[in-house]
């Protein structure tokens, strides 16, 4: 089990892109256009990151939707 401090780590756009197997531009497009994808956090001028806890919550939402779809079939 992870503690909240482990989940409060911040990921760069490159790290998020690698996590999902897409390019950095895709991550920015998702952040701008998808309501369920986590929004980045601006930490300072030119420093924008995603919270690991937000990414984990997003992934849990996707898993819940996938399970619900399988059950409904």
Image: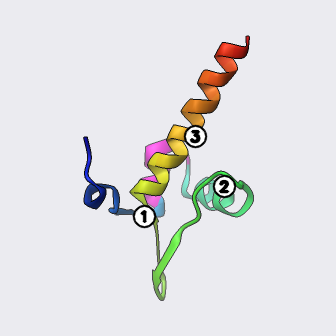
Q: How far apart are marks 1 and 2 (CA)?
A: 14 Å
The image position of residue 14, as x and y in percent, is 45, 58
Question: In this orientation, which residue lies closer to the viewer: 63 or 29?
Answer: 63
Who's the residue at 30% across and 57% down the image?
A: 4
Is residue 62 among what the camera can see? yes
> Which circle marks residue 34 in the picture?
none
> Which circle marks residue 30 in the picture?
2
Q: Is mark 1 on a helix, strand or loop?
A: loop
Q: What element carries label 2?
A: helix
The residues colored magenta run 14-22
Q: Is mark 3 on a helix, strand or loop?
A: helix
Q: Earlier in the sequence, mark 3 or mark 1?
A: 1
Who's the residue at 54% across and 47% down the image?
A: 58
Q: In which quarter of the image is residue 62?
A: top right
The image position of residue 65, as x and y in percent, is 64, 31
Q: Which of marks 1 and 2 is nearer the N terminus?
A: 1
């Amino acid at each position: 089990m992870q503690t909240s401090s482990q989940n409060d780590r911040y990921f760069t756009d490159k790290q998020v892109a690698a996590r999902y197997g897409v390019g950095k531009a895709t991550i920015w497009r998702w952040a701008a256009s998808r309501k369920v994808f986590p929004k980045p956090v601006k930490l300072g001028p030119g420093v924008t990151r995603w919270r690991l806890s937000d990414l984990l919550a997003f992934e849990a939402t996707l898993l819940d939707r996938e399970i619900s779809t399988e059950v409904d079939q």
